[in-house]
Image: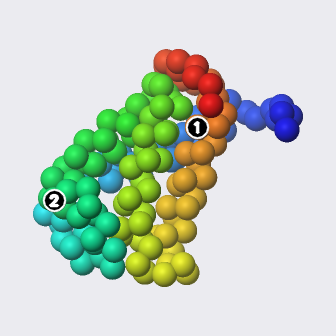
Amino acid sequence: MNNDIKVSGLSVLLLRIALSGIFISAGITHLTHPDKIAGRIDNAAYSEFAYFFGDPFILGILTGYVLLIAGIMFLLGILTRWSALILFIVLIPISITIQMGNGLIHGPFWKNIALFGGLLFFILNNPKAYNLYNKTIKF
């Protein structure tokens, strides 16, 4: 199904700004308080999933850099589809480790589902409105 739907470029920009804020702030938190991130991972119901990827303290720092850099790129519209894809991929283990253990009716879990939906919009559509740089790739 390939129907063109017209949307306001301004609405796309506002969605991108609103969506990027959580990733930028999470990246800053991961970098300024990696010990607290490691503690949250240790106390999570699915902490063993995170340990599969490495030491929680190091993971906190690494994900902090990824969230911050990709979040800023996403905010500015630099390689929007790629930055959204990177954020989507990083959000998967975070959601599994931290959010899933609290149950399906847990609010933050559904916040992450909404984030996945917002990121999917940019991954699937790659809107060019108000982007600084956007290399086109086909999915």
Disc number for residue 123: 1
Relative placement, left or right, of 37 versus 11 is left
Residue 48 lies, with reference to residue 62, above or below; the image says below
Q: Nearer the viewer, residue 31 or 39?
A: 39
| Residue at screen point 53% across, 54% down | 115
Task: Answer yes or no: is residue 7 visible.
Answer: yes
**The quarter of the displayed image where residue 39 is located:** bottom left
Amino acid type at image mark 1: Ile
> What colouring style does the render use?
rainbow
Q: Position of residue 70 (x, y in %)?
A: 38, 37
**The quarter of the displayed image where residue 8 is located:** top right
Residue 88 lies, with reference to residue 1, above or below; the image says below
Is the residue under label 2 in contact with that under label 1 (CB below 8 Å)?
no
Amino acid type at image mark 2: Asp
Q: Position of residue 81 (x, y in %)?
A: 53, 32
Quadrant where the image shows the C terminus: top right
| Residue at screen point 32% across, 53% down | 26
Q: Earlier in the sequence, mark 1 or mark 2?
A: 2
Relative placement, left or right, of 43 versus 46 is left
Residue under pointer 2:
55
| Residue at screen point 44% across, 47% down | 89
User: Pointer 2: residues within 10 angstroms few (<14), some, or many (20+)?
Assistant: few
Figure label count: 2
User: Pointer 1: residues within 10 angstroms few (<14), some, or many (20+)?
Assistant: many
Q: Position of residue 79 (x, y in %)?
A: 47, 25
